[in-house]
Image (cartoon, coloured by chain):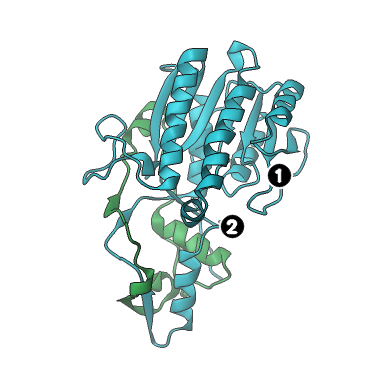
Chain colours: A green, B cyan
Amino acid sequence: MGDILGKRIKIETDESRLRKVDRLQQLGDPTKLQSETGWAPAWSAREALSAIIDGLGYNAAPGHAGH
Amino acid sequence: MNFRQKPMAFRPAKPPFSTVLVTGAAGFIGARVVRLLEDLGCRVIALDNGYVGLPLPPASALTIPVSVDLRDRAALKRVFAEHQPQAVIHLAAVHHIPTCERDPHLAFDVNVMGTQSLLEALETMPDASLNLVFASSGAVYAWDDGPLNETRTMTGANDVYSITKLTNEYQINGWAQRRGARTRIARLFNTIGNGDPNGHLIPDILTQITDGGEVATVRLGNTKPKRDYIYVDDVASGFVTMLSHMLNGPPSDVSNLCT
């Protein structure tokens, strides 16, 4: 997101934001629906974030093409 | 000027049903599902109780907005009797995790008993109309290292939300077997997009970045967990695709809706 906005960022851990229980990974296997129906996601995570950033009224860095 | 080519979500074939009832139709995902169905030429009964504070989709030549609470069993049966839907996409649920943990009675009431009301209303329809696409969750899987797979990964819910969703899967599968219905369960992963009434993390990070100085400090919780994010337009297209393919394959099936 820092890259999309053209800003350098540093990440710190905020203890108050830690959840009691947090799964280490929750990644799905999309193969079944794709092979049975031809459906596939069209939006990359970066494109999705760019659209959300736009929608919230923030400006992407000049020259950023959303890809 | 900053031109951005937006991706076009997969366009499903027209579902083989002329009238489709959508629950949670005012929601972040539901409103897009309604628009897509309408665009494909389906008549849509757009049902919602206004819980998240978003407006019902507007009435049009093809869309009929209906303000009804899922838990109102009599009202729900009247909606089915009046509009005779041939299929249902069931999206309505309390899915905000902190709300589910804080108010489990509400979560069970809406997600489990609301689904029960829906099944009871649905089964007043002719057999050929017993077609249901249901929004379950990737959270019903047991914790596992590899990509979570419909046949290889065990289920194992452990928080209120995922317990209601796994309960729904048992409810729906049992009902479908007893009634000879057709069902498609979508295990949906983390949906993101514009207009999410529960979307707090991305706006929060944006504020931290834009309020920060030359190098902005972003304070987060645990940054190790990996999640599967899917854009809301892809989600809407996925649900409608499942409906379009409803009459192919086994009577009941479950698929991940993820990236």
Give residue B15's mark: none
Horizontal relation, residue B108 to residue A32: left or right: right
Q: Is residue B91 above or below residue B249?
A: below
Q: Residue at 58%, 50% (x, y): give it.
A: B28
Tell me which chain the residue with mark 1 is part of. Answer: B
Which residue is most to the bottom?
B213
Q: Nearer the viewer, residue B47 or A31?
A: B47
Give residue B57's mark: 1
Does dot 1 land on a helix, a strand or a loop?
Answer: loop
Mark 1 is surrounded, within 10 Å at the Cα level, by few (under 14), some (14 to 19) or many (20 or more) other residues, namely: many
Mark 2 is surrounded, within 10 Å at the Cα level, by few (under 14), some (14 to 19) or many (20 or more) other residues, namely: some
Residue ID for mark 2: B195
Does dot 2 land on a helix, a strand or a loop?
Answer: loop
Q: Mark 1 vs mark 2: same chain?
A: yes
Horizontal relation, residue B223 to residue B24: left or right: left
Q: CA distance from mark 1 to mark 2?
A: 14 Å
Q: Residue at 59%, 35% (x, y): give it.
A: B114
Q: Residue at 38%, 69% (x, y): give it.
A: A17
